[in-house]
Image (cartoon, rainbow, N blue to C red):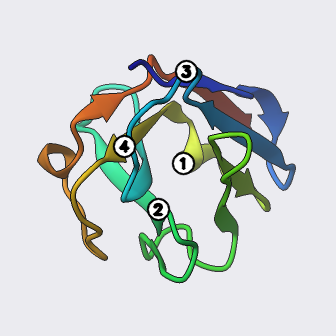
Amino acid sequence: VQLQASGGGLVQAGGSLRLSCAAPGRTYSTYAMGWFRQPPGKEREFVATIKWSGDRTSYADSVKGRFTISRDIAKNTAYLGMNSLKPEDTAVYYCAANRLYYSGSPVVTDFDTWGQGTLVTVSS
């Protein structure tokens, strides 16, 4: 089952965007969803994660207070609300799903299904 990320684009510093991650045709349960990002020339890094039940979330220190992860169970969709964007938030953003467990400090290998990525560019 593929994930479909969308919502990226070009925004000025201080602006906002909301990314979406849809899982059409999903037939198995999700335990957690996560967002990662990969800045140009750098490794993929953790941004935020949510337990699918909605009662636990975790954020990278660099985005705390600015980004909000959420999910809509009925739509099988996860979201990443991004406010007060900075040029250093520029990256390709990936969503991912973990069918087995939730981790508050996840790494790439914790997730077994990934979306194709959506580019976020923040201009100064």
Label 2, label 1: how many angstroms apart (C-alpha)? Answer: 16 Å
- Mark nearest the camera among 1 and 4 is 4
Query: Label 4 belongs to which residue?
Result: 97
Helix, strand or loop at disc 1? helix
Whole-angstrom CA distance, mark 2 to mark 4, is 12 Å
Of the residues under marks 2 and 3, which one precedes in the sequence? 3
Q: Would residue 82 be found to the left or right of residue 2 on screen?
A: right
Residue type for callout 2 = Ala
Which of 86/64 is in front? 64
Residue mark closest to the camera, 2 vs 4:
4
Residue 121: % across, % down:
66, 29
The percent coordinates of residue 64 (x first, y second) are 57, 77
Q: CA distance from mark 1 to mark 3?
A: 35 Å
Choose top left, top right, bottom left or bottom right for residue 2.
top left
Left of 100 or right of it: where is 50?
A: right
Percent x, y for residue 14?
84, 55
> Which residue is label 2 attached to?
48
Looking at marks 2 and 4 on the same chain, the residue that comes earlier in the sequence is marked by 2
Residue with the mark numbered 1: 88
The residue where tag 3 is placed is 25
The mark lying in front, picked from 2 and 3, is 3
Q: Secondary structure at mark 4?
A: strand
Label 2 or label 1, whichever lies nearer to me, is 2
Q: Earlier in the sequence, mark 4 or mark 3?
A: 3
Amino acid type, label 4: Ala
